[in-house]
């Protein structure tokens, strides 16, 4: 692969020799595919969301509540999901992704205490519940906050 072999992907480039409004012989002359008269035949058009003077949808729907821009999306994992690891394993967010337990750790991973754990593990996560820490440390493991 070098510069002399580069070409656009199939279907990404369209022909630019199609000249609108250049007479009947062009195949798309006179009205240039816009039909006769009307708002859509003219230049300018309307802004997105305009409904011809009717109260637009974004103004008809009631606005309620508040959305905090600074919220974090924490992925919660139960202690029972850690059973797939071997004894004395260091469990990190990356190992959770490799095992398929977590697919998209957006703003962090929190370990919750639901379920049973029978293996000694060193778990490194963004947050732990009190029950999860108790279950991990009861077996001699460690719960480390990253």
Image: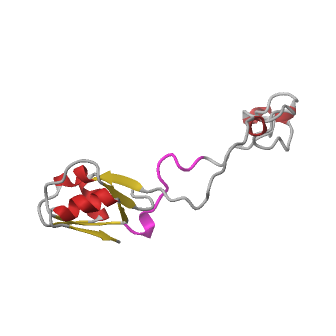
Quarter location, residue 145: bottom left
- The residue positioned farthest toward the top in the image shown: 36
Q: What residue is rendered at 27% in x and 52% in y?
A: 100
Quarter location, residue 121: bottom left
- The color scheme shown is secondary structure
> In front here: 55 or 12?
55
Residue 129 appears left or right of 44: left
| Looking at the image, residue 80 lies above or below residue 26 | below
> In front here: 118 or 88?
118
**Which image quarter holds the N terminus?**
bottom left
| Looking at the image, residue 7 lies above or below residue 10 | below
Task: Examine the rendering and report whether any part of residue 102 can be seen.
Answer: no
**Which image quarter holds the C terminus?**
bottom left
Q: What residue is rendered at 85% in x and 27% in y?
A: 36
Assign the magenta stretch its main secondary structure.
Answer: loop
Q: How many labels does the image show?
A: 0
Report if residue 9 lies within the magenta region.
Answer: yes
> In front here: 61 or 41?
61
Report if residue 79 lies within the magenta region.
Answer: no
Quarter location, residue 34: top right
- Residue 64 is situated, as x and y percent measured from the top left of the image, at 69, 43
- Residue 2 is situated, as x and y percent measured from the top left of the image, at 40, 69
- Residue 83 is situated, as x and y percent measured from the top left of the image, at 18, 53
- Residue 122 is situated, as x and y percent measured from the top left of the image, at 21, 67
Q: What residue is rendered at 77% in x and 34% in y?
A: 60
Q: What residue is rendered at 80% in x and 33% in y?
A: 51
Residue 99 appears left or right of 34: left
| Looking at the image, residue 144 lies above or below residue 24 | below
Q: What stretch is highlighted in magenta?
A: 1-14
| Looking at the image, residue 11 lies above or below residue 31 | below
> In front here: 53 or 123?
123
Task: Examine the rendering and report whether any part of residue 86 can be seen.
Answer: yes
């Amino acid at each position: 692969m070098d510069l002399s072999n580069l070409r656009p992907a199939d279907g990404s480039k369209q022909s630019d020799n199609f000249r609108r409004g250049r007479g009947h012989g062009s195949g798309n002359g006179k009205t240039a595919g816009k039909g006769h008269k009307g708002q859509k035949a003219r230049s300018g058009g309307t802004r997105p969301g305009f409904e011809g003077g009717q109260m637009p949808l974004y103004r008809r729907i009631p606005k309620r509540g508040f959305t905090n821009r600074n919220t974090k999306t924490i992925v919660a994992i139960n202690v029972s999901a850690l059973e797939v690891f071997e004894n004395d394993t260091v469990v990190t967010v990356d190992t959770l992704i490799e095992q398929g337990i977590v697919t998209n750790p957006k703003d962090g991973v929190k370990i919750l205490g639901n379920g049973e754990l029978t293996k000694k593990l060193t778990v490194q996560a963004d947050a732990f519940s009190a029950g999860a820490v108790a279950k991990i440390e009861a077996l001699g493991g460690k719960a480390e906050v990253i």
